[in-house]
Image: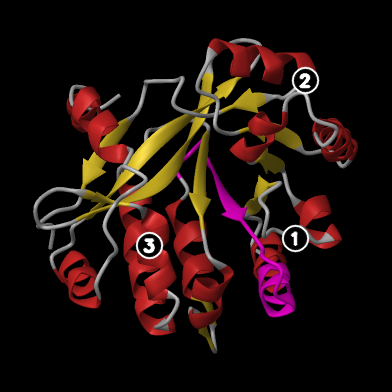
Amino acid sequence: MNAILKEEFNVLEHAHRLARPTPAAAALHPHELLDILLNRRFGVEYQPVVDTVSGETEGYEALARFYRANGEAVPPNLVFEMLHENPLLLFHTELELKKLQIMHAPKTELLFLNLDPDSFHVGGTPGGNVFTELFRGSRCPGQEIMIEVIENLHIRDVARANAMITDFKNADIKVATDDLGVSNGLVSFGSFCDSSFIKFDRAWLRERGNRKFAVLEWFHGMAKAAGARTVLEGVETLGDLALAHDIGFDCVQGFYFRERFVNEAWGRP
């Protein structure tokens, strides 16, 4: 681990405080969004993906983090909801974040990166796609970049997600299906079968004791049958970890694991 990463681990408590904005966070106004982007008040948190049996960290997911001028954390969903109203600005922000996330990533076996299919769509050029070229040219020896894909109920987004997956597959870039189980999600057969990892949303943990919980085990069995490795997100307690182990998840992820750090991009050129 290099000196930069050691320094980042020393700010663990600072990262923990900033990375979990309160549910009652104030709405984001357009001028604040521009201030965040123009002054690069964004950064990345690397959250470990841990082997359920061995307890070893297999990789990290790079999570986008945004801050107001006063240092207050802004929920990423607020930022991305506004960015979707301006596709070019969404593309620019995603590209800057991906460069930052790759630049400061721990040198582990796996690096999970989220990418919105709408951003990928805007990044298309006559010679290929900007994101595909970035990921293909940024792989470190021994490290696999895993692109997380989430789809919603709009058929256009499913089509864009499938087109993105096909492009990555042709470039030998692996993908993971993200947030399986969210209320507005729809996983296509193609993306399910082409995914190296299937990540299950934290919402499943709230279904313990309900009939719906049986669906989790069914989906988990389907993922394993398709040859994908499985990750349960949102693990925050020892009970959550035990549940993941009992069901047979390969890996877990969540705030139970405090080995994480934030790299803030403030003021970087």
Q: Please give the label number shown on residue 186.
A: 1
Q: Bin the neighbour count of mark 3 within 10 Å (Cα to Cα): few under 14, some 14-19, many 20 and up.
A: some
Q: Please give the label number shown on residue 78.
A: 3
The amino acid type, in three-letter code, at marker 1 is Leu
Q: Does the magenta stretch include residue 145?
A: yes
Q: Please give the label number shown on residue 248.
A: 2
Pair 3/1: label in front: 3
Q: Is residue 195 magenta?
A: no
Q: Where is residue 238 in the image (x, y as percent from the top left)?
A: 55, 11
The answer to whether marks 1 and 2 mark residues whose Cβ atoms lie closer than 8 Å is no
Pair 1/2: label in front: 1
Q: Position of residue 79 (x, y in %)?
A: 35, 64
Give above or below for 11 relative to 127: above
Q: What stretch is highlighted in magenta?
A: 140-162
Q: Distance between the residues labelled 3 and 1?
A: 21 Å
The amino acid type, in three-letter code, at marker 3 is Leu
- Quadrant where the N terminus is found in the figure: top left
Give above or below for 148 relative to 200: below
Tell me which residue sits at (88%, 35%) in the image: 218
